[in-house]
Image: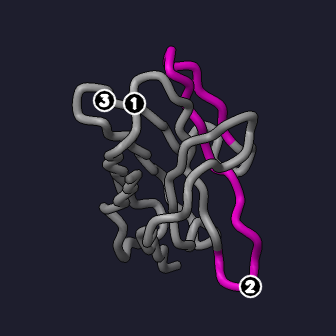
């Protein structure tokens, strides 16, 4: 059974940093593309960043240059380093496996990121 557990969220002031982690179990982690998504109140969930099995990365324009996605296949974990945070980054952040650009598994509980101005 696949399980995705996100952690590392919190309350931070604008300009601050957070590092999110997503631990995956029940999946052959090293061969899959992983993505970080976020959902702000009243908005649709959106893809923030993704990383392929070979380490290629893509970012939403809104976070490019501020966020960095990485992975540790030995730990079955994907990370999202978030710098220069803005109030508009406030959302619940989720990770998921991506298949043909779409999320594949049921969503985990996510981790709340709140950026105060």
Rendered image: mark on residue 42:
2
Classify 10 Å Cα crowding around label 3: few (below 14), some (14-19), many (20 and above). Answer: few
Image location (x, y in percent) of residue 71: 38, 31
Element assignment for label 1: loop
Instruction: Judge whether residue 58 is colored magenta.
Output: yes
Rendered image: mark on residue 72:
3
Q: Nearer the viewer, mark 1 or mark 3?
A: 1
Tell whether 38 sits left or right of 9: right
Q: Is residue 45 above or below residue 59?
A: below
Instruction: Judge whether residue 54 is colored magenta.
Output: yes
Element assignment for label 3: strand
Q: Is residue 2 above or below residue 55?
A: below
Image location (x, y in percent) of residue 2: 41, 51
**Relative to the observer, which residue lies in front, 40 or 67?**
40
Q: Which residues are magenta?
A: 40-59
Q: Nearer the viewer, mark 1 or mark 2?
A: 1
The residue drawn where x is 39% and y is 30% is 28
Image location (x, y in percent) of residue 26: 35, 44
The residue drawn where x is 40% and y is 32% is 29
Residue bearing mark 1 = 28
The residue drawn where x is 51% and y is 60% is 94
């Amino acid at each position: 059974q696949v399980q995705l557990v996100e952690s590392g969220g919190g309350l931070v002031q604008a300009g601050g940093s957070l590092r999110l982690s997503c631990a995956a179990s029940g999946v052959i982690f090293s061969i899959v593309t992983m993505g970080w998504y976020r959902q702000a109140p009243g908005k649709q969930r959106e893809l923030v960043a993704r990383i392929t099995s070979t380490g290629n990365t893509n970012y939403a324009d809104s976070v490019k240059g501020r966020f960095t996605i990485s992975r540790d296949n030995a730990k079955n974990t994907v990370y999202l380093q978030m710098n220069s945070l803005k109030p508009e980054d406030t959302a619940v952040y989720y990770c998921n496996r991506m298949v043909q650009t779409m999320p594949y598994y049921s969503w985990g509980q996510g981790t709340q990121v709140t950026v105060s101005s």
